[in-house]
Amino acid sequence: MSNAVSLKEVYKDYFKVGTAVNNRCLDRDKDIILKHFNTVTCEYEMKLAGLRRPDLTFDFANADKIYNFANENGIEVRGHNLVWHQGIYTEVLESMTKQQLIELMTEHMRTVGERYKKVVCWDVVNEAISDDWNGFLRDTVWRRKLGDDYYMTVFRLAREIIPDKTLVYNDFNEYEEPKRNNIIKLVKQLKTEGLIDAVGMQCHINILYCTADDIKRSFEEFSKLGLPIHVTEIDIGLPEMNDPAPLSSMTQEQREQQASLYEALFATMREYSSIIDSATVWGVRDSQSWLNNFRFERECTALLFDKDGQPTEAFYRITQF
Ligand code: XIL
């Protein structure tokens, strides 16, 4: 492994530094994880469909592996997630009544709460806001079954069943104003009943759509909520998401822009560090990134370690300040 400085050491006076892990990368990237990160999030293994078979019986094997690895090494685990429109068995949930769905969630929260005692927080509801910025909520099976205020119901349940956990609302495109306003509206509703403890800003950003100013503005606006912020899923994609062009077509200039945006993001997070709990990158090395399979198959370089596990230019830019 390279003799680069340790991320968690560099940031120890600012916030925790995390990565998304899965069972495949746990062995391969063990050294990188141990050296650089003090919090991890399961990329899939703690989602409903990661914890349960299609008949909804539990299979804890994959989540346990990550949870035990983290505990044995003194690494914190973020719980991701309880209610989402993906990572579920939609048809199975669709066939259930409102009451059955509430019972399922009650059992689910009780079970994960008891089994994963050292998980510090849960993304209770993930990505509830609509991609149609004129609307408010995304259409999901949870919403159809439990009603338009389903996120209130789910957070109330979580508060009751896992009272010792930090309860988080987590969403993406938070740096775009209309989406941000909707996220803030939802969080304020949760706050009226004291149901939320932190806001999760995913931070899947892209050099084509997000500037250093957008980043700064989003931290400023979220800081006004008076809640801690978890930056939960950082990556900076280079290509236009709807463009199947392979990464090799990316220019040196774009790579430079990416490194600068990483630098600006981490500088802004340091500026707001008094309210930032943690900054988690969505994957250890580039070959693990979900962006490699998002809409098109391609080779993405959006993370802090390249496909060979070597620190990228962005890594050096965020560790030298
Ligand atoms: C992605 C994972 O990275 C993939 O491995 C999985 O197949 C699908 O989900 N927003 C989220 C994450 O909240 O859970 C998603 O993770 C990426 C987008």
Image (cartoon, rainbow, N blue to C red):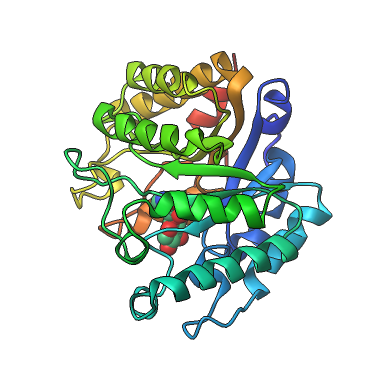
Residue 150 in picture, x, y percent from top left? 39, 55
Relative side of 76 to 296, left or right: right
Question: Where is residue 290, by image quadrant?
Answer: bottom left
Q: Residue at x 34, y 24 (%)?
A: 257
Residue toward you, 36 or 272: 272
Residue 139 in picture, x, y percent from top left? 26, 57
Q: Is residue 211 visible?
A: yes
Q: Is residue 79 visible?
A: no
Residue 30 in picture, x, y percent from top left? 70, 54
Vertical position of residue 200 compared to residue 100: above or below: above
Question: Where is residue 227, by image quadrant?
Answer: top right
Give the tally of numbered discs.
Answer: 0
Residue 50 in picture, x, y percent from top left? 53, 70
Vertical position of residue 266 compared to residue 78: above or below: above
Question: Where is residue 248, by image quadrant?
Answer: top left
Residue toward you, 189 or 207: 189
Relative side of 235 to 82, left or right: left
Relative side of 243 to 321, left or right: left
Vertical position of residue 128 compared to residue 221: above or below: below
Where does ligand 1 appear, by image quarter?
Answer: bottom left
Q: Residue at x 32, y 45 (%)?
A: 129
Q: Residue at x 53, y 49 (%)?
A: 123
Residue toward you, 143 or 180: 143
